[in-house]
Image (spheres, rainbow, N blue to C red):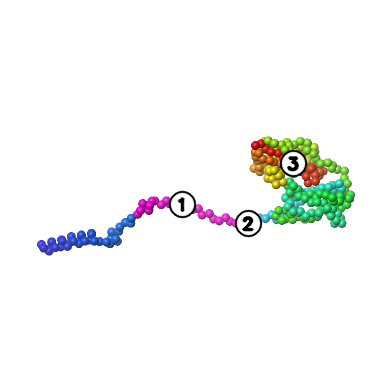
């Protein structure tokens, strides 16, 4: 009886000791204390699109030299009274080194210049230089260069021959825009110029800005319809007129006989201002 009582007491003491004195966290792990800030839910990560670096594209350089399309002396002859010779190319010309010489390679001191409108035409103008002698040979020699440094050699031979031909340049009869006109509608989509004879070639541009030589080309399209030269706004290509701006139509024209008007590297100017 005494032995059984003693065993019960020892068992009770053992249970009490284990439940009050045990410090083994591995048996009863205590959860960590988490602050309110740490308890906030972290948003899921935002996926980042990885863009591969661009593949370098080879630089394509223009290696094609300018091509001569036409000239005043295409027929191999020119009138002795001519004081301007023109050469037209398929692209803008940036540099020129051209001279006009006789059969003895003596320079006639004609002055070369680049067309002020398109840059694709070159003029040789007689300024205090010798004129042509009838039935004598002459030569245009040198080179032209485009903006990419491509050069074209020029070597043209021709004669000065007296001919009975039309030497009168075309003149303007009517025009749809007047010089210094104001309050022009921005809805205008064409400018029309009518001449006294059929026009074979024309150079015409619409320029925005106070100075037409340095202004913005509006990229309107030129058409020739017998005696009419039309400058037309083209959808998707041309720039539109804006209110309160100054513009200039710059024009020159040539007939079938090769007479340019105005001559001597000059142009007609039609400056106007749009409505505000």
Along the viewing direction, whichever of 210 and 139 lies nearer the viewer? 210
The structure residue drawn at horizontal position 76% and vertical position 37%, both measured from the top left corner, is 194
Per the model, the C-alpha gap separating discs 1 and 2 is: 36 Å
The residue shown at (71%, 44%) is: 212
Q: What percent of the width, then of the height, locates residue 77?
A: 85, 49
Q: Kindly report the secondary structure that dominates the magenta region of the rendered protein.
A: loop
Residue 167 position in % (x across, y down): 84, 42
Q: In which quarter of the image is the C terminus?
A: top right
- Residue found 76% across the figure and 53% down from its top: 96
In the rendered image, is residue 10 in sight?
yes
Work out whether residue 220 can be spotted: no
Graded by Cα atoms within 10 Å as few (under 14), some (14 to 19) or many (20 or more), the crowding at tag 1 reads few
Residue segment shown in magenta: 34-59
Label located before the other in sequence (1 or 2): 1
Mark 2 vs 3, N-terminal side: 2
- The residue lying at 83 percent from left, 47 percent from top is 83
Kindly check if marks 2 and 3 are in contact, taking CB atoms under 8 A apart as contact.
Answer: no
Q: Which one is in front in this view, the residue at disc 1 or the one at disc 2?
A: 1
Image quadrant occupied by the N terminus? bottom left
- How would you rate the neighbour count of disc 2 (Cα within 10 Å): few for under 14, some for 14-19, many for 20 or more? few
Q: Which mark is residue 140?
A: none
Side (left or right) of 27 relative to 129: left
Q: Residues within 10 Å of mark 3 (few under 14, many from 20)?
A: some
Q: Mark 2 points at which residue?
A: 58
Residue where numbered disc 3 is placed? 269
User: Residue 31: where, in percent of width, then height?
Assistant: 32, 56
Looking at the picture, how far across and down is residue 174, in whole percent?
76, 36
The residue beneath circle 1 is 46
Question: Could you tell whether 80 is left or right of 36 in the image?
Answer: right
Mark 2–mark 3 Cα distance, whole angstroms, equals 43 Å
**Sooner in the amino-acid sequence: mark 1 or mark 3:** 1
């Amino acid at each position: 009886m005494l032995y059984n009582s003693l065993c019960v007491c020892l068992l009770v003491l053992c249970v009490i000791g284990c439940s009050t004195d045990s410090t083994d966290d591995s048996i009863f792990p205590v959860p960590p204390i988490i602050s309110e800030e740490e308890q906030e839910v972290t948003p899921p990560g935002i996926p980042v699109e990885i863009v591969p670096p661009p593949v370098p594209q080879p630089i394509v350089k223009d290696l094609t030299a300018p091509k001569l399309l036409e000239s005043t002396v295409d027929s191999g002859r020119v009138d002795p009274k001519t004081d301007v010779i023109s050469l037209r190319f398929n692209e803008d010309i940036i540099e020129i080194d051209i001279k006009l010489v006789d059969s003895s390679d003596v320079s006639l001191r004609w002055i070369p210049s680049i067309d002020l409108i398109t840059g694709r035409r070159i003029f040789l103008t007689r300024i205090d230089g010798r004129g042509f002698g009838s039935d004598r040979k002459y030569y245009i020699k040198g080179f032209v260069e485009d903006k990419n440094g491509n050069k074209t050699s020029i070597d043209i031979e021709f004669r000065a021959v007296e001919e009975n031909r039309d030497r009168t340049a075309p003149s303007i009869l009517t025009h749809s825009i007047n010089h210094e006109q104001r309050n022009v509608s921005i809805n205008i989509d064409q400018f029309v110029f009518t001449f006294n004879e059929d026009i074979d070639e024309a150079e015409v541009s619409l320029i925005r800005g106070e100075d037409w030589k340095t202004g913005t080309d509006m990229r309107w399209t030129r058409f020739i319809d017998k005696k009419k030269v039309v400058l037309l706004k083209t959808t998707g290509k041309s720039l539109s007129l804006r209110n309160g701006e100054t513009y200039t139509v710059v024009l020159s024209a040539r007939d079938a006989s090769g007479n340019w008007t105005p001559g001597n590297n000059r142009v007609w100017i039609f400056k106007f201002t749009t409505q505000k």
